[in-house]
């Protein structure tokens, strides 16, 4: 009979709060990278996930991911949180485990938004991330963590390199292609409106990531200490290499580059955090800078408007991390893990590749299907005219930096709100 | 020579600049202004506070051109700034008494677009 361990519970309480903070952090990271007129909408795309993805998780997705089921999908035993009480799940209360895992679902869905910013209508976006959580996140989480087929084959994913980052990265790439590029993409300079926001977001993401990786030990254990320290080390190495790449390529170390480097390092160490030595974490972080740096450089030459480079950062970063896990993992550091290619077990690399490939394929196909299905019911993006005006005013009726000049206060008794724009009927041309 | 003052939508600025560049109109001044041209006002809500945004952000372009460039410039602005909705803005054409280029002290026609006829 499993019993609850107070120390483990205390650490997981903190970890859950840390990971939840990553979604507002992502809002700042993304919000700084877009134009002033779209900054609220971009931030709301992350914030709204706290609501709809969280609720979807509690009502159904948690059960599909973690209740006992088959190799492909969990069961229905925990639908609507049925049977999720304070009894022990491992060494922590079951309901806390549900909350901890829920924070992962939320940020994973929010990550995708970076590929569709500045053009996707808010209603369809909300519908998309809800369906995506149910149809893509829950199954893939089940495969890797919930007792599904990848887990039973021995694929290693400590904190979500495959489940979170490859999953979101590939979905983002497909979403960007289905949506099409922004009207200004490749035609005029689209610059970040607040680089300080982006740096703030990167810093808060790192802070939250200690819960993401450290908490994935699900205990206040030696393993948590290892994962925590690796999360401390790897992004440092990535930051150094990224900055050097920036310096040698352009002659200057850029702030946006530094913020991106930190996130890529965090992404790459995620699958490996509890399986590799601290020295390997440094190496992994350093190596991981190269593929993502290259992917960003190449992507911006294409017509694919993955606006905030979710694929290059999270897809490629997650892939690099997952494969390097298959090379650098050591049983000496985590007996529950496996040895990697460099430690005499070449099959682990193949297993890692299988995990990456199957998650990427499934996420890509399902994202395409969900978006195409939604597009039959409603327009996914705003008309070009509205793109010009900006998403803050058109989607939310607010401005990020309203001066108030020229605004007339409407007394509450006279306030006649504008006709709400129907979220799911084909839009009127002027909106 | 004339001074052409155009009030346009901020989100058309890039298109207008591109059109003016293609028409070889060089030299202009851009300012951010607030204005109102009869478009339906926008309503914004912040918590319980509802406001009507009566003055919209607009861009004012001031372009000094020689007589031969007046039509070219107007055409370029009209074509590139138009969306067809209320609020597209206006183009005013004003007579100019005198113009001096500060750097050289050149006067009138020599001091406005087209620049390449000067000193060539």
Image: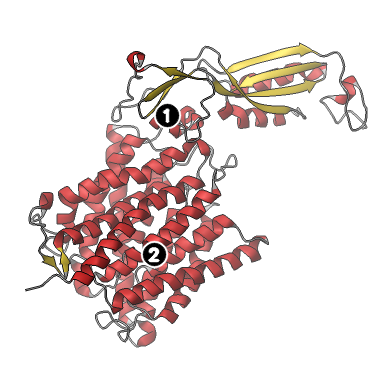
The local secondary structure at tag 1 comes to helix
Mark-to-mark CA distance, 1 and 2 = 35 Å
Disc ID at residue A104: none
Quarter-wise, where is residue A316 in the image?
Answer: bottom left
- Residue at (58% x, 27% y) in the render: B10
**Residue to which mark 2 is pinned:** A318
**Residue to which mark 1 is pinned:** A394
The local secondary structure at tag 2 comes to helix
Image height of B7 relative to A235, above or below: above
Image height of A64 relative to B95, above or below: below
Query: Please, which colouring scheme is shown?
Result: secondary structure
Chain ID, mark 1 = A
Quarter-wise, where is residue B4 in the image?
Answer: top right
Quarter-wise, where is residue A99 in the image?
Answer: bottom left
Marks 1, 2: nearer the viewer: 1
Question: Residue A210: percent from the left, percent from the top?
Answer: 36, 66
Image height of A141 relative to B1, above or below: below
| Quadrant in which the C terminus of chain A is drawn | top left
- Residue at (41% x, 32% y) in the render: A382
């Amino acid at each position: 009979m499993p019993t609850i361990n107070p120390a483990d519970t205390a650490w997981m309480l903190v970890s859950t709060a840390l990971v939840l903070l990553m979604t507002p952090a992502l809002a700042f990271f993304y919000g700084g990278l877009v134009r002033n007129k779209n900054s609220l909408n971009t931030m709301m795309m992350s914030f709204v996930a706290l609501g709809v993805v969280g609720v979807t998780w509690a009502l159904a997705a948690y059960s599909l991911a973690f209740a006992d089921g088959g190799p492909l999908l969990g069961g229905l035993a925990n639908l609507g949180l049925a049977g999720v009480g304070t009894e022990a799940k491992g060494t922590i209360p079951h309901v806390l485990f549900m909350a901890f895992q829920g924070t992962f679902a939320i940020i994973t869905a929010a990550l995708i938004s970076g590929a569709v910013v500045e053009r996707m209508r808010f209603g369809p976006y909300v519908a998309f991330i809800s369906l995506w959580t149910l149809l893509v996140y829950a199954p893939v989480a089940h495969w890797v963590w919930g007792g599904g087929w990848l887990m039973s084959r021995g694929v290693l994913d400590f904190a979500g390199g495959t489940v979170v980052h490859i999953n979101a990265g590939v979905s983002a790439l497909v979403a960007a292609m289905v949506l099409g590029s922004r009207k200004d993409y490749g035609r005029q300079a689209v610059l970040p409106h607040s680089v300080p926001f982006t740096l703030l977001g990167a810093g808060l993401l790192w802070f939250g990531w200690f819960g993401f990786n450290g908490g994935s030990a699900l205990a206040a254990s030696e393993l948590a200490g290892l994962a925590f320290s690796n999360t401390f080390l790897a992004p440092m190495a990535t930051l150094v290499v990224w900055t050097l790449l920036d310096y040698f390529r352009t002659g200057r170390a850029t702030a946006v580059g530094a913020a991106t480097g930190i996130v890529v390092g965090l992404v790459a160490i995620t699958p490996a955090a509890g399986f590799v030595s601290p020295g390997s974490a440094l190496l992994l972080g350093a190596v991981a800078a190269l593929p993502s740096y290259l992917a960003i450089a190449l992507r911006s030459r294409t017509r694919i408007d993955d606006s905030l480079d979710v694929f290059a950062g999270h897809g490629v970063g997650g892939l690099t991390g997952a494969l390097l896990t298959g090379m650098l993992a050591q049983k000496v550091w985590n007996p529950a893990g496996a040895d990697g290619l460099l430690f005499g077990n070449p099959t682990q690399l193949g297993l890692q590749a299988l995990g990456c490939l199957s998650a990427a394929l499934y996420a890509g196909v399902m994202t395409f299907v969900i978006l195409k299905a939604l597009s039959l019911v409603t327009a996914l993006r705003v008309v070009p005219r509205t793109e010009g005006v900006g998403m803050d005013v058109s989607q939310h009726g607010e401005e990020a930096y309203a001066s108030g000049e020229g605004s007339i206060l409407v007394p509450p008794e006279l306030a006649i709100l504008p006709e709400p724009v129907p979220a799911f009927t084909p839009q009127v041309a002027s909106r | 020579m004339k001074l052409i003052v155009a009030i346009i939508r901020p989100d058309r600025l890039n298109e207008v600049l591109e059109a003016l560049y293609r028409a070889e109109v060089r030299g202009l001044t851009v300012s951010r202004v607030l204005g109102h041209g009869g478009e339906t006002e926008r309503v914004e809500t912040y918590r319980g506070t509802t406001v009507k945004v009566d003055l919209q952000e607009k861009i004012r372009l001031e372009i000094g051109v020689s007589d031969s460039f007046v039509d070219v410039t107007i055409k370029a602005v009209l074509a590139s700034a138009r969306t067809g909705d209320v609020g597209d803005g206006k183009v005013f054409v004003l007579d100019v008494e005198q113009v001096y280029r500060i750097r050289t002290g050149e006067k009138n026609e020599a001091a406005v677009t087209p620049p390449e006829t000067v000193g060539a």
